Image (cartoon, helix red, strand yellow):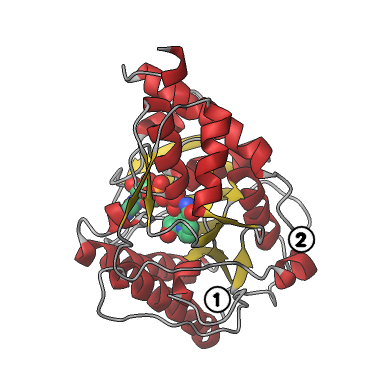
Amino acid sequence: MENYRTKRILVTGGAGFLGSHLCDRLLAGGHEVVCVDNFFTGSKQNVVHLRDEPRFEVIRHDVTFPLYLEVDEIMNLACPASPIHYQTDPVQTTKTSVHGAINVLGLAKRLGCKIFQASTSEVYGDPQVHPQTEDYWGHVNPVGIRSCYDEGKRCAETLFFDYHRQVGLRIKVARIFNTYGPRMHPNDGRVVSNFIVQALRGDPLTIYGDGEQTRSFCYVDDLIEGFVRLMETPDSVTGPINLGNPGEFTVGELARRVLDLTGSKSKVRHLPLPQDDPVRRQPDITLARKTLDWEPRTPLSEGLPRTIEYFDAFLRRHGRPARNSER
Ligand SMILES: NC(=O)c1ccc[n+]([C@@H]2O[C@H](COP(=O)([O-])OP(=O)(O)OC[C@H]3O[C@@H](n4cnc5c(N)ncnc54)[C@H](O)[C@@H]3O)[C@@H](O)[C@H]2O)c1
């Protein structure tokens, strides 16, 4: 592990769900944070509590354009992460991953600094091996509606490794699996936020397919701990490294948990599975356990109530009906 010292760290996508938690964590560690975001899916609300923090600044910028800053480290999270958002403008999604990577890698090369990439389990596509280990190359459709995200992220990984091989850049690539927690988007179509918002509003919970498809959900604080540990590893550790929670739940089971915890009387509605939706996805985190001495610590029974509390407050603030059990 490196000796601890305070640094100025660039977080792209810092006003998003994960980015804002990362900014909190880095500031708590005594660092300066420069948050760069174009607010496509992120919001000022996510970082408003940092407004008076002198070690924090926000720059509105689109990473598909070059950026010139003086920082000690870069953590590249900019990219819409949910299908609803990344499919809104798929060309921009690919540009964000690919041109964005080229721009931040160029900056890292100029500064000679360490750089982190928020990659994704989507690089495995609809996997044919379970659970997925980092040496699995994936099963990805290059021409489907999810390809802008999956292939964009794959190409970004390629760029990171080519910069590493070609110019010796110090890289850290994390493959993130489904993460949940406060500050997720209320209507991004992701299963955890969908279910919670539907339950709190008293709307039917939408299950695509029969609900037997599984997901693994990592609580956001656990994931951010993984990022920080990865950044502290020796330069020989480049990743890719899976970060996620290997505990599998079926989507149907998650729906039942959310209904229990919210006390909602919502019904469950089944709809057809969207194109290319992976049936099963589960991380093998052996490498993270060994290299980072890391594993998720927060069970769903702790993380879900915190997330429900956030959405309950969010929906109250936005004038929507709160828990339907109360009305
Ligand atoms: N949340 C997850 O479960 C998950 C899983 C796998 C990978 N990831 C990756 O982690 C990163 C963060 O995801 P998130 O869940 O916080 O998503 P998010 O949509 O909340 O955050 C992404 C942030 O990037 C910003 N952004 C998008 N395009 C940009 C651009 N061109 N220039 C500057 N900023 C831009 C958005 O405004 C937003 O603030 C993403 O790269 C995503 O692919 C997330």
Number of dots carrying numbers: 2
Question: Which percent across, then down, holds residue 222?
Answer: 66, 48
**Disc 2: which residue:** 2
Q: CA distance from mark 2 to mark 1?
A: 17 Å
Residue sitting farthest toward the top: 327
Q: In the rendered view, would you say 80 is above or below 91?
A: above
**Disc 1: which residue:** 169
Ligand 1 contact, mark 1 (Cβ < 8 Å): no
Q: Earlier in the sequence, mark 2 or mark 1?
A: 2
Task: Tell me if residue 33 can be seen.
Answer: no
Task: Tell me if residue 301 can be seen.
Answer: yes
Q: Secondary structure at mark 2?
A: loop
Question: Which percent across, then down, holds residue 149?
Answer: 34, 67
Q: Secondary structure at mark 1?
A: loop
Q: Is residue 239 left or right of residue 178?
A: right
> Could you tell me which residue is drawn at 45 percent across and 13 percent down?
326
Residue type at numbered disc 2: Glu
